[in-house]
Image (spheres, rainbow, N blue to C red):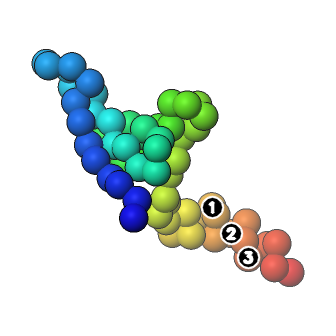
Amino acid sequence: MTQFSAARLEQGDATVLLHFAGHAFEPLTSGGLYWHAERTLLVADLHLEKSRPCQARLAAAAL
């Protein structure tokens, strides 16, 4: 079973790290997770299909 935990780095520090499968992730106020070890920003559920410019490009590419 994979362990999941959240912990503060230091007393009074506002940074919270989520530990999952041996890796530490920092939740961001924007809704993303930053994976420090890989210098990678993880995002999900962007709803790109709802923007009009994106819809126009997708429609043009389908022709």
Is residue 45 or residue 11 the one in the foreground?
Answer: 11
For residue 60, above or below residue 37: below
Name the residue at the left extreme.
12
What residue is drawn where x is 13% and y is 18%? 12
Name the residue at the right extreme.
63
Name the amino acid, label 2: Ala
Disc 3: which residue? 59
Mark sitting on residue 53: 1
Viewer can see residue 28: no
The image shows residue 8 at horizontal and vertical percentages of: 22, 30
Q: Are marks 1 and 2 in contact (CB under 8 Å)?
A: yes
Q: Is the residue marked by circle 2 packed among few (<14), some (14-19), or many (20+) residues within 10 Å? A: few
For residue 21, above or below residue 24: below
Tell me which numbered mark, 3 or 1, is placed earlier along the sequence.
Answer: 1
Is residue 8 or residue 58 the one in the foreground?
Answer: 8
Disc 2: which residue? 56
The image shows residue 39 at horizontal and vertical percentages of: 58, 31
For residue 30, above or below residue 57: above
Q: Are marks 3 and 2 in contact (CB under 8 Å)?
A: yes
What residue is drawn where x is 39% and y is 64%? 1
